[in-house]
Amino acid sequence: MAESSRITIIVLLSLIVIVTVLLWFNAVLVPYVKVFFCPCNKTRDSSAQQVYRVSGNLEQHEVYEAEIVETVYIVNDIKLEGIEQNRTHQRPKNNQQCTKVRNEDRFDCDPEGAITQTNCEKRGCCWKPVLRLTVNQSAGIVPPLNVPWCYYPSNYEGYKVNKVYNTKLGLNADLIRTTQSPYPEAINDLTVEIRYETQSRLRIKIFDPATVRYEVPLNTPDVSQAVNDTLFTVSLSKPTERFSVSVIRKDNAVVLINTTGASPLTFCNQFIELSSFLPSSFIYGLGEHRGPLLHNVNWTRYTMWNKDNPPHEKANLYGSHPFYLVMENDGKSHGVFLLNSNAMDVILQPSPAITWRTIGGIIDLYVFMGPTPGEVIQQYTEVIGHSFMPPYWSLGFHLCRWGYKTANETLAIVEKNRQAGIPQDVQWNDIDYMDSKKDFTYSTEFGDMPAMVNTLHNKGMHYIMIVDPGISNEFPGNYGPYDLGIKMDIFIKDSQGKPLIGKVWPGDVVFPDFTNNRTFDYWTQLVKSFHDKVQFDGMWIDMNEISNFVAGSINSCPKNSIEDPPYVPDVAGGSLRFSTICATSQQNLSISYNVHNLYGLTETEATYMALKTVRNKRPFIISRSTYAGQGYYGGHWSGDNFATFHDMAMSIPELLNFNMFGISMIGADICGFQLDTTEDLCQRWYQLGAFYPFSRSHNSVGLKPQDPASFSQDLIESTKTAYMIRYSLLPYLYTLFHKSHMMGETVARPLFFEFPQDKNTYSIDSQFLWGSSLMISPALAKGTTSIGAYFPSGVWYDWYTGGAIHSNGSVVKLEAPANKINLHVRGGSIITLQDPELTTTLSRKNKFSLVVSLDDDGTAEGDLFWDDGDTIDTHTMGKFNMIRFHSSKNIVTNNVMYAGYTDEPMLLRSIVVFGVLQKPSTVKFNGMAISQFTYDDKLHVLKAQGIAANLLKTFTLQWV
């Protein structure tokens, strides 16, 4: 063969190889090189990395980014070209304004997560990719994730102040946008309204003065005049300057809110963003989310869009509470509430800083100055409403499961636990009782439901059943709740004005619109009609996010920017309609796009009003879906949790967060709802659950029973012990609920609420307090026989023995055998107890006792609120008693502040005093020596028994 032919063949073969390699590279490697980490619809976090092909299909890989390739990306099949037409086309004016921005101070100019360098710079923003290594987290390497590649320069203008002027409420400013918005339908002219509402409360509203936009119709305090003497000052940028606002604490000049240098204000029809630097990294709240009590500010996202989503980390769950509390570095505290119910992302970054990013409504910020964390919550609940006053019986133990198939089976479970000596006040039923799973019905297969409830009442117990919002439309003319709803025209409509049809347990359903006043009357009629048959005592409203087994409706949803907005927060499922109704659904107040997060709140309000009318007693409601203000009408449980030690541990930050959100009646399904539980888990969980404000065991159909009497005698005995302690403490717990109802205090609270100067308490969420006096330190891990519990400075007394622990703020090793939960009483406290029984009906007839826990200086104090436990508004009617107790210098006395309830005797039988350092020779009650007293000279505990006194009359106990 000629040399020239051989060369030709070699060249051709080489070309074929090159082309093949290029094709393979283009098809296989390029998609993995041309990636942008963390598109807007997917979770951005530091524990896992999601890598996308150009097509948008999700793949998981371990990739080292050795090269950044500029390209046009397609993320989730949405092309960028369609949203680029309204972008600004200016380059950063000064590159130094990009290079001097620290990584932790970068504010994202590309929240969609799908932009190129060219388009980033067209927005007037900075482009600087950060090389990142995606690794297996088990290797212990945490890469610097989520630093934005496209970020705002420090001199980005956005809006400028046009005019500033005083008003009778405070201060106003008019803003004008000076750069083209990166989002469609920008609102170029805005008004900032700053209201000095109280000495410790500031309100900042930013809105479109030319157009009425949706605002959350929460019944907040009406203020007509600015308060001059405030704990804060406000600094607003001057005319012609870029808009910024700062809120400064007067007494120490700490800046609580500071938008200067943060991302510029963005205000478009479907995208609103406001960022602010925080004074510290100690931030809490932003619910409902699963995770530690103290938030991580290292690029963490919290999404709010109510969703039927079993509790797990890094996901939007059943409720939305756009409120946070910050502990400042000097121990003071403040809080911020964004009154906005649209879907939103809240971003925390290491500066530390926060970014609010919502897709509708307005900016309506409340700032609460504290300065203690407890005062912050009081100020917050003054705006959203204090928690409801529960009936006394609701503080007892509740038992439920999905799978009690008949009335007789339900009663058999009650009797089995009663015979085992387990206190119980309330029995529940899940959907098993319903006829074809239809609301306000009961089936013949279930049995005689009215007789079952009457039997419970005869035992001194109460009854609650589940009700879902979905009303079956499959039996027109034969199902009253549907027929009445059609007649009254109260169902949510689709975009065509017809009742929207979804699918839940009974099949095809329609949903009442609780933003319609007529629906309150409709719901009251249904509640009354069913209550006339079955004398239930409270209601459990579930599936009210709204949960939907189809996306949107059985007829799908229209295709428009309401259903698929330019920016979609990081909602589970990637769309607003996933597992719920269409965002375009029409409700009386607005479209569901705006009011979706309010459904559980509005249903709870309607249910509260219905129960109040029908029963003429205090309503008791537990709802799965919540929004700010929920606690005014009802409580919450943490949803469909799992039978794991992790879920048990995570229930503590959940109940502490919800107390911060003004929902004091909160608990988790004891032993777990999903998965078969184990005896060691359930034993520990019943001990912890005995100290949930709302204490209920509940699990799913098809799983093994987990009521206490279904386990060994060891578990039965330890559970009985824990609940007998709870029942003895109910007067103290009831008083805490009274303070929550009247003054906005928390019932369960973190340690840092009582010890704000002790930073060791800031991250503790494995222990908690009831009020200020009782510390609960549960065992939360499998096989635990001892725990390390943190004791803040002071003296603490062992609940069981009265033995003292004197602490300067340290971790103490405590024995934690399987049958015990550690409890300690804080020195300086007086707690009122009542002899426990198997129901509160019986225990309320018993005598009281006092536990006096002396502080190091020999003093203590406490109080007791008491009424009949069921009548509405006893405080307003004056049908209550309020008693204060005080101890100082070897004397315990009472002070009857108010005595308006005398229908039940309030007899005192004993007083126990912890911390009596010397054995007394004489103990006198009302000046008369008593012989029935004991003294433990090792534990320094004095017990005065055989006392016969009326708590409503002044008494004195003295030891010498």
Image (cartoon, rainbow, N blue to C red):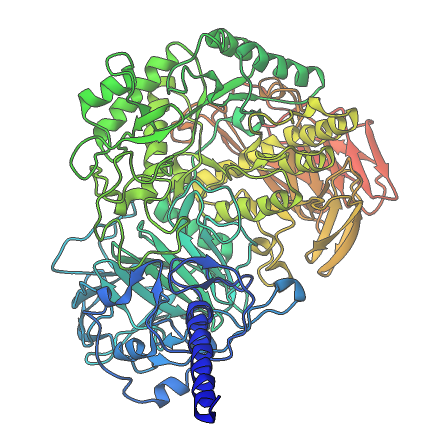
- Left or right side of 328 for 552: left
Number of dots carrying numbers: 0
Quarter of the image for residue 492 reads: top left
Quarter of the image for residue 673 reads: top right
- Residue 519 seen in the figure: yes
- Left or right side of 285 for 190: left
Find the residue positioned furthest to the right. Answer: 938
Find the residue positioned furthest to the left. Answer: 210
Looking at the picture, does residue 605 appear above or below residue 871? below
Task: Where is residue 426? Give x, y as percent.
Answer: 55, 22
Q: Nearer the viewer, residue 70 or 765?
A: 70
Residue at left 71%, top 19%?
A: 421
Looking at the picture, does residue 361 appear above or below residue 228? above
Looking at the picture, does residue 344 appear above or below residue 702? below
- Left or right side of 265 for 718: right
Looking at the picture, does residue 575 appear above or below residue 605? below
- Residue 921 seen in the figure: no
